[in-house]
Image (cartoon, rainbow, N blue to C red):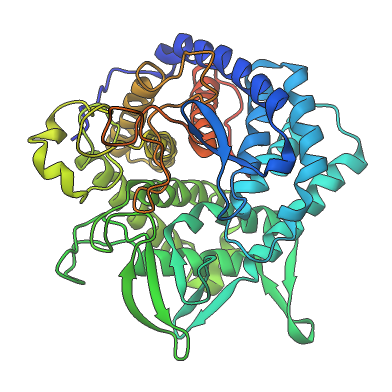
């Protein structure tokens, strides 16, 4: 269980964050100079060097979005130029990509961040430039919403596995639907039917909360409150739920911690977004109190599970049911060991979850729950403190990653295992690096009482 430091403040992390962004600039620049886009998208490192991995091109937005975040944090115009140039040159196919559930990853990280900076007055942008960003986000949200599997009780955005597959990851891709709706866009269907992006956002989040998140209510023999199934499988002939599954976790009945992280952060961000909308917009879905209540229940369950099933330092192992954990004794009562001989940690799950904990805590605090707010924000800051230092922060200039000890796909054996080791360690991934920067930016803005960093501030 995480040993939460309730005395920790955002201001206390400013010096580590400054160091982080100093290292970050060097790594972004070095990779930009070396990488050949014809080789595909950099995904994760092997022996400290970024390499691609054909599956889906879901990490390119993190590559270019990292430079935009770097500008946001430091004002480095060269970083803004990298982010802008590559967004224009390489991201258009991601906007119209009908085959993936990753629009919130790719397009909000690039077009969304650029539009947000323009709206904040941080970058000069003509009316045509902002219209370009807006159009990309509108189309992206509609294309994402079109990946729809209807159920008798609603529906969901299906994963790249096909119309039977509801992924936990997609909770954070709902940002693309949120921005499209905020910009006044809809998905046009057959016979010119206007399909609300907000309706599909709420519908997917409800399906995810109902099927992928557990509440300790006896749904099956492994129903522990806050546990997350990576995938839920449906019979598309009649829309009936069949079973939990997992693509990247150990089993359908354990919790892949990065899947949990996507869910935690996704609900926290969407709660913040819904707080900016008129309550009348949520009337068709049972009303604002009911919708918000469902989202809060899922967010709090996953947040509590993360705190209770993560080692003392706040960095989780890659799956809570990974078999090697049984040989590690009381591993939850001490800091995680990325160099152990049994199971790898996944620091990217920590970077994503830390932001979710902070956002959820702030959201609940604004609604009068001071005790929950203090607990979740302090937990997020505790996790961040561990990530902003060795052995997780990459200080070696020859290593192209920023956040070390990330795991991509343990069951497939894709992660690099160093010579003399039995498990993956010491490597980075695009999403881990990006979310470490994003976490640092969230905390820095809080420390300096700057405008709150949120995807919907456009």
Percent across and percent down for residue 81 are 80, 26
Percent across and percent down for residue 389 are 38, 16
The residue lying at 40 percent from left, 35 percent from top is 406
In the shown orientation, is residue 131 left or right of residue 274? right
Q: Dividing the picture into quarters, in which one does residue 292 lie? A: bottom left
Determine if residue 316 is in view.
Answer: yes
The residue lying at 42 percent from left, 46 percent from top is 414
| Residue 311 higher or lower than 228, as above or below | above
Q: How many marks?
A: 0
Position of the C terminus by quadrant: top right
Percent across and percent down for residue 438 are 54, 31
Front in this rendered view, residue 389 or 114: 389
Front in this rendered view, residue 70 or 199: 70
The residue lying at 11 percent from left, 36 percent from top is 328
| Residue 347 higher or lower than 28, as above or below | below
| Residue 451 higher or lower than 204, as above or below | above
Determine if residue 121 is in view.
Answer: no
Percent across and percent down for residue 375 are 28, 33
Q: Residue furthest left?
A: 329
Q: Dividing the picture into quarters, in which one does residue 64 lie? A: top right
In the shown orientation, is residue 209 left or right of residue 51? left
Position of the N terminus by quadrant: top left
Q: Residue furthest front?
A: 419
The residue lying at 51 percent from left, 10 percent from top is 19
Front in this rendered view, residue 161 or 227: 161
């Amino acid at each position: 269980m995480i040993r939460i430091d309730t005395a920790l403040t955002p201001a206390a992390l400013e010096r580590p964050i400054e160091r982080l962004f100093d290292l970050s600039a060097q790594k972004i620049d070095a990779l930009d100079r070396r990488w050949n886009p014809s080789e595909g998208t950099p995904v994760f490192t092997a022996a400290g060097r970024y390499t691609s991995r054909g599956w889906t091109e879901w990490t390119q937005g993190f590559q270019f979005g990292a430079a935009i975040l770097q500008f946001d944090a430091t004002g480095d115009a060269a970083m803004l130029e990298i982010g802008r140039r590559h967004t224009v040159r390489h991201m258009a196919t991601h906007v119209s990509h009908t085959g993936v559930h990753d629009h919130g990853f790719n397009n909000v990280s690039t077009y969304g961040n650029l539009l947000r900076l323009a709206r904040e007055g941080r970058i000069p942008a003509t009316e045509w430039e902002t219209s370009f960003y807006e159009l990309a986000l509108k189309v992206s949200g509609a294309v994402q919403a079109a990946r729809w599997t209807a159920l008798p009780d609603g529906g969901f955005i299906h994963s790249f596995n096909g119309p039977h597959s509801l992924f936990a990851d997609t909770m954070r891709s709902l940002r693309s639907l949120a921005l499209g709706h905020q910009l006044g866009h809809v998905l046009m269907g057959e016979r010119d039917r206007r399909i609300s992006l907000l309706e599909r956002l709420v519908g997917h989040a409800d399906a995810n909360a109902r099927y992928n998140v557990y509440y300790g209510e006896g749904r099956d023999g492994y129903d522990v409150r806050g546990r997350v199934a990576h995938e839920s499988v449906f019979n598309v002939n009649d829309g009936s739920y069949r079973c939990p599954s997992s693509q990247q976790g150990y089993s359908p009945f354990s919790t892949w911690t990065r899947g949990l992280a996507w869910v935690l952060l996704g609900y926290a961000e969407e709660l913040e977004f819904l707080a900016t909308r008129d309550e009348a917009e949520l009337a068709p879905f049972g009303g604002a109190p009911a919708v918000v209540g469902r989202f809060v229940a899922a967010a709090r369950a996953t947040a509590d599970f993360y705190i209770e099933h993560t080692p003392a330092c706040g960095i989780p192992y890659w799956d809570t049911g990974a078999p090697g954990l049984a040989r590690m004794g009381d591993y939850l009562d001490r800091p995680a060991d990325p160099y152990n001989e049994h199971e790898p940690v996944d620091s990217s799950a920590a970077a994503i979850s830390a932001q979710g904990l902070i956002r959820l805590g702030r959201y609940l605090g604004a609604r009068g729950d001071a005790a929950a707010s203090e607990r979740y924000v302090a937990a997020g800051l505790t996790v961040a403190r561990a990530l902003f230092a060795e052995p997780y922060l990459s200080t070696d200039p020859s290593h192209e990653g920023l956040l070390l000890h990330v795991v991509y796909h343990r069951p497939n054996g894709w992660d690099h295992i160093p010579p003399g080791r039995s498990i993956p360690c010491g490597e980075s991934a695009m999403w881990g690096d990006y979310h470490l920067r994003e976490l640092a930016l969230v905390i820095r803005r809080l420390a300096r009482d700057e405008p709150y960093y949120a995807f919907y501030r456009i």
